[in-house]
């Protein structure tokens, strides 16, 4: 049986590459990239005394990524703008992999500053992108609380903006409380620190509103506040955010994303807490207006009651009865007279009817000497009704007698 073929170098633990071989190959691959233009923000710059090489770190403002740069000292000295931490630049360099240390860097041959016009154009492009995503829509704006429990303040350490916000707010409402987070407000580290402070305050249940405050400055100084990462972090907050960056003409993108844009830090202090004096004056005015309204209502009701009491029906409630007493008396007398007259007339009529009835009745006839002869229950009308031997009952005025018929005879 033949022996198995040996694996290629670097493909098995039995036939590994040495470190130098891997380093040389990586350096060869990177060397094939050629020259590239790279834009970023200078995060660190190390100029060593007596060294002809300057070491820098170029950071991507929109992401947590960076590159190491090396460039000749003369190139830094002759740069079109003074290079400091936070400067936005475009560099031309050659990617290099240093095999001795196993590190990657960009060897810079040319440095160009990003002009204000280009910065503004990029900010405008980002503004259109965020607007298209709806981050500026008014429906996303959260209302500020009337009286916040705690105000979160993100600003530079011992800055004029911090003094303006805290002093003006305390003068307006002495009981106001602040949770201050001091961060860098310009330079390469500003965005990361501000975003971290923003998320911490947003997670604090005691904080009811967050103020992002900074004084004025150039476009480059205010560049972190137009950073996409910061804008999205503000939009993701559940706590209302007030942007008080720069002065009135300044308009970084965070102003458009925030729930409220204040012209200055002082204006932000006036927006987040009410003015004690103004609120007390409002309360006093409302009390006076309510008291005046109550007094007017009472006066109006009193006048209404006075008018009701002055009406004849209420002023002299028995007057109508008194005025009608004679009329009622006359009506009662007329009713009694008419009833009496009616009863008298009816009594006389009944008397006449009784007399007539008595005259026409059988009792009156019997009293005049007549008699009623009955045979059983029948009244005799003819002689034939009482043949001989019929028992007869003869009724007279004062009683009745019985007799026996002896037969009839004609007169």
Image: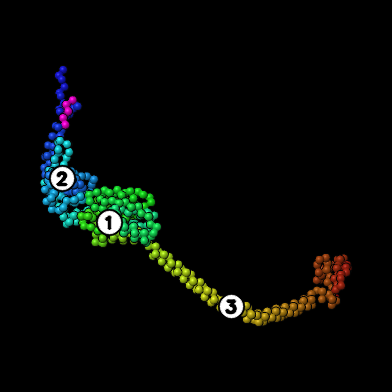
> Which residue is identified by label 2?
49
Q: Position of residue 87 (x, y in %)?
A: 19, 51
Span colored in magenta:
14-19
Residue 140 seen in the current view: no
Q: Does the magenta stretch include residue 16?
A: yes
Total numbered labels: 3
338 to the left or right of 38: right
> Which residue is identified by label 3?
315
274 to the left or right of 301: left
Q: Under tag 2, what secondary structure?
A: loop
Q: Earlier in the sequence, mark 1 or mark 2?
A: 2
Residue 93 is tagged as none
Q: Under tag 1, what secondary structure?
A: strand
Where, by quadrant of the figure, is residue 18 drawn?
Answer: top left
The Cα atoms of the two marked residues, 2 and 3, are separated by 112 Å
Q: Earlier in the sequence, mark 2 or mark 3?
A: 2
Q: Is residue 203 magenta?
A: no
Q: The C terminus is located in which quarter?
A: bottom right
Instruction: Tell whether label 1 touches label 3 (CB within 8 Å).
Output: no
Residue at 17% across, 57% down:
117
- 411 and 106: which one is in front? 106
- In this view, the residue farthest toward the front is 50
């Amino acid at each position: 049986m033949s022996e198995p073929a040996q694996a290629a170098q670097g493909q098995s633990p039995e036939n590994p590459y040495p470190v130098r071989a891997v380093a040389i190959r990586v350096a060869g691959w990177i060397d094939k990239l050629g020259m590239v233009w790279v834009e970023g923000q200078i995060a660190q710059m190390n100029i060593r005394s007596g060294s002809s090489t300057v070491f820098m770190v170029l950071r991507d403002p929109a992401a947590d990524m960076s590159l190491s740069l090396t460039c000749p000292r003369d190139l830094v000295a002759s740069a079109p703008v003074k290079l400091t931490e936070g400067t936005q630049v475009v560099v031309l360099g050659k990617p290099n992999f240093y095999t001795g240390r196993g590190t990657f860097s960009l060897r810079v041959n040319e440095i160009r500053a990003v002009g204000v016009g280009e910065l503004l154009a990029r900010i405008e492009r980002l503004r259109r992108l965020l607007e298209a995503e709806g981050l500026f829509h008014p429906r996303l704006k959260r209302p500020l609380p009337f009286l916040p429990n705690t105000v979160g303040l993100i600003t530079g350490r011992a800055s004029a903006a911090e003094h303006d916000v805290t002093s003006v707010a305390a003068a307006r409402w002495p009981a106001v409380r602040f949770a201050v987070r001091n961060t860098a407000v310009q330079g390469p580290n500003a965005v990361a620190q501000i975003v971290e402070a923003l998320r911490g305050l947003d997670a604090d249940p005691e904080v009811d509103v967050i103020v992002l405050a900074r004084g004025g400055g150039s476009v480059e100084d205010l560049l972190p506040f137009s950073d996409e990462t910061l804008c999205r972090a503000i939009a993701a907050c559940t706590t209302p955010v007030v942007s008080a960056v720069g002065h009135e003409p300044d308009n970084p993108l965070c102003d458009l994303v925030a729930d409220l844009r204040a012209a200055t830090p002082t204006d932000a202090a006036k927006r987040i807490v009410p003015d004690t004096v103004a609120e007390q004056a409002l309360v006093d005015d409302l009390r006076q207006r309510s008291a005046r309204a109550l007094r007017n209502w009472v006066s109006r009701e009193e006048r209404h009651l006075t008018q009701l009491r002055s009406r004849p029906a209420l002023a002299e409630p028995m007057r109508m009865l008194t005025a009608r007493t004679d009329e009622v008396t006359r009506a009662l007398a007329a009713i009694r007279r008419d009833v009496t007259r009616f009863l008298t007339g009816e009594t006389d009529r009944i008397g006449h009817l009784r007399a007539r009835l008595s005259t026409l009745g059988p009792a009156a006839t019997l009293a005049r000497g007549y008699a009623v002869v009955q045979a059983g229950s029948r009244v005799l009308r003819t002689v034939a009704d009482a043949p001989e031997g019929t028992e007869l009952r003869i009724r007279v005025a004062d009683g009745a007698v019985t007799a026996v018929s002896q037969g009839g005879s004609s007169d």
